[in-house]
Image (cartoon, rainbow, N blue to C red):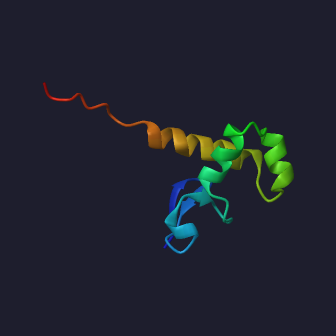
Amino acid sequence: MTKTAHSRIAIDPTVCGGRPVVAGTRVRVSDVLDMLAGGASEDEIVSDFPYLATADIRAALAFAAHQMDHPIVAAAE
């Protein structure tokens, strides 16, 4: 069973332990984020992983941003 979290991001319990990946690959969203955080450009990533597209990288960023967008709960005083 594959759940589509975004048009280019998939979550399948049989692929990479159910971690979000670029659809059709075993490249985890966290791998893309790590590369970007390490200073790699989109062009460098696509050059190193030719089966990825710039749109895949941007989808990984959008997915991560969506995951981080949660309501802020104020602690009870």
Q: Position of residue 69 (x, y in %)?
A: 43, 36
Residue at horizontal 79 percent and vertical 47 percent from the top: 45
Total marks placed = 0
Residue at horizontal 77 percent and vertical 40 percent from the top: 40
> In this orientation, which residue lies closer to the viewer: 49 or 53?
49
Q: Position of residue 71 (x, y in %)?
A: 32, 34
Residue at horizontal 60 percent and vertical 59 percent from the top: 21
Position of 32 relative to 12 (above/below): above
Q: Position of residue 42 (x, y in %)?
A: 78, 41
Query: Does 46 sit left or right of 56 as displayed?
Result: right
State the residue lying farthest toward the left: 77
Position of 21 relative to 41 (above/below): below
Q: Position of residue 77 (x, y in %)?
A: 13, 24
Residue at horizontal 67 percent and vertical 60 percent from the top: 27
> In this orientation, which residue lies closer to the viewer: 71 or 74?
74
Choose top left, top right, bottom left or bottom right for residue 62. Answer: top right
State the residue lying farthest toward the top: 77
State the residue lying farthest toward the right: 47
Query: Does 50 sit left or right of 33 as displayed?
Result: right
